[in-house]
Amino acid sequence: METLARIGSMSVVQRVATVLWLSFLMAGVATGFFFSVIDPLELKYCVDFPEVSRTAAYSIGFILFWLLTSTSSLLAAFFIYPTKETKASKSQG
């Protein structure tokens, strides 16, 4: 319970920074797993993109994985742990 109390007292900036850092790490893992199975140069047969190098495909994949993990994590963090202002307004009303 003490951990939950500490998370509830974190500022919004701290929460966003935590979520972005953890989602950055998970995007690196997801990119590694994804591109260890799929060759980026073979993706050109599935999608209609202009020719891109492997490095560009890795970068695009990483950014997309980071957007996906950060969005889902931010939504989860804000729905599970309300901010201090929300708790204060509930106790007054």
Image (cartoon, grey):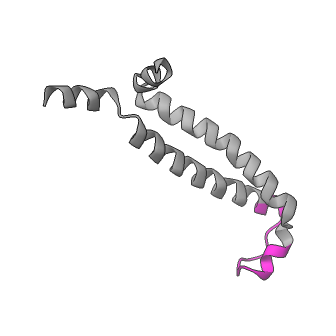
Instruction: Give coordinates of residue 17: x percent, y percent.
Output: 54, 33
Indicate left or right for 70 with 79 as reference: right
Which residue is at 71% across, 79% downward? 47
The answer to if 78 sits in the magenta stretch is no
Q: Quadrant of residue 89?
A: top left
State whether residue 76 is above or below residue 61: above
Q: Where is 20 relative to 13, above or below?
A: below
Magenta residues (range)? 42-57
Pick out the residue farthest to the front: 1
Residue at 73% across / 52% down in the picture?
Answer: 30
In the image, residue 46 sits, relative to residue 53, either above or below, namely below
Q: Nearer the viewer, residue 45 or 73?
A: 73
Answer whether residue 56 is magenta in the image.
Answer: yes
- Horizontal side of 46 relative to 93 (left or right) equals right
Q: Quadrant of residue 58?
A: bottom right
Q: Observer-nearest residue: 36 or 60?
A: 36
Residue furthest out toward the left: 93
| Residue 22 rendering spot, x and y as whole percentages | 63, 37
Relative image position of residue 8 (x, y in whole percent): 40, 26
The residue located at (77%, 61%) in the rendering is: 56
Residue in the picture at 19% in, 26% down: 91
Examine the image and state in which quarter residue 79 appears. top left
Query: How many numbered tags mark residues here?
Result: 0
Image quadrant in which the C terminus is located: top left
